[in-house]
């Protein structure tokens, strides 16, 4: 399969989608979602990006981020760090909970490295540079309406693991979102 072209997002917002390997719905578990939220917060500080929007769906997540041109590396650097560390944490949590069915689904037939026996995330991720305020708002609406389209909730702000709550209810209790960045 040909590699997808990487988008240079530095100085612009970037819409990122990454999916769980084999689309296993591991983010129905609150503790798995908490691992993702903690790591988004950690890597936003480490890599220096603004979090403009997010949604954590059962088998994938969407982020709209704005990397700080002075601090952040490429989006691929951010995602490599994020996916590598969250994979380890998620695997350890599954081992602790004896989730053998999930662990078997993620087990590699041929381990790549000595300790690399599982693949939690799909190998690649999608990214799209966002170059206008209109495009950013379109992506935010797409992100927020994802749980509604999947009939998980009636209104975007009813889904707890989405930035719709930050925008509509000004609720930053789950994770801080840079909602004021897009005010024009």
Image (spheres, grey):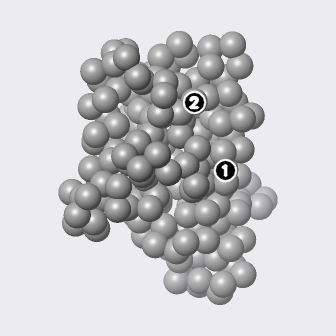
Q: Is residue 145 left or right of residue 164?
A: left
**Point 66% across, 50% down: residue:** 39
Q: Quadrant of the C terminus?
A: top left
The image's mark for residue 152 is none
How crowded is the residue under tag 2: few (<14 C-alpha within 10 Å), some, or many (20+)? many
Q: Which corner quadrant holds the N terminus?
A: top left
Q: Is residue 100 left or right of residue 183?
A: right
Provide the secondary structure element on which disc 2 rests: strand
Give the residue at x 26% y 58%: 155
Q: Position of residue 150 (x, y in %)?
A: 24, 62
Asked if residue 32 can be seen in this view, the reply is yes
> The residue tagged with tag 1: helix, strand or loop?
helix
Tell me the distance, in whole angstroms, between the alpha carbons under discs 2 and 1: 14 Å
Q: Nearer the viewer, mark 2 or mark 1?
A: 2
Do callouts 2 and 1 mark residues in contact (Cβ within 8 Å)?
no
Q: Which quadrant holds residue 37?
A: bottom right
Question: In the depicted view, which residue is nearer to us: 86 or 161?
Answer: 161
- Identify which residue, 129 or 178, lies in the foreground: 178
Count of numbered tags: 2
At horizontal 21% and vertical 57% (from top left) the residue drawn is 149
Above-or-below relation of 13 to 101: above
Q: Which mark is drawn over residue 50?
A: 2
In the rendered image, residue 23, in percent from the top left (x then y), is placed at 40, 63
Q: Is residue 55 left or right of residue 152?
A: right
> Is residue 110 visible to the viewer in this orientation of the structure?
no
Mark 1 — residue? 39
């Amino acid at each position: 399969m040909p590699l997808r072209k990487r988008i240079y997002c530095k100085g612009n917002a970037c819409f990122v989608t990454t999916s769980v390997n084999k689309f296993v719905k591991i983010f129905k578990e609150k503790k798995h979602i908490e691992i993702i939220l903690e790591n988004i917060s950690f890597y936003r500080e480490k890599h220096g990006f603004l979090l403009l929007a997010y949604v954590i769906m059962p088998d994938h997540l969407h982020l709209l981020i704005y990397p700080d041109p002075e601090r952040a590396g490429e989006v691929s650097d951010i995602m490599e760090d994020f996916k590598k560390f969250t994979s380890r944490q998620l695997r350890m949590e599954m081992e602790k909970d004896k989730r053998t069915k999930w662990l078997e689904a993620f087990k590699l037939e041929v381990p790549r490295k000595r300790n690399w026996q599982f693949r939690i995330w799909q190998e690649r991720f999608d990214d799209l540079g966002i170059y206008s305020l209109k495009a950013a708002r379109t992506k935010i609406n797409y992100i927020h309406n994802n749980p509604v389209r999947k009939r998980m909730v009636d209104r975007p702000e009813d889904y707890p693991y989405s930035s719709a709550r930050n925008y509509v209810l000004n609720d930053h209790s789950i994770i801080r979102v840079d909602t004021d960045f897009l005010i024009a």
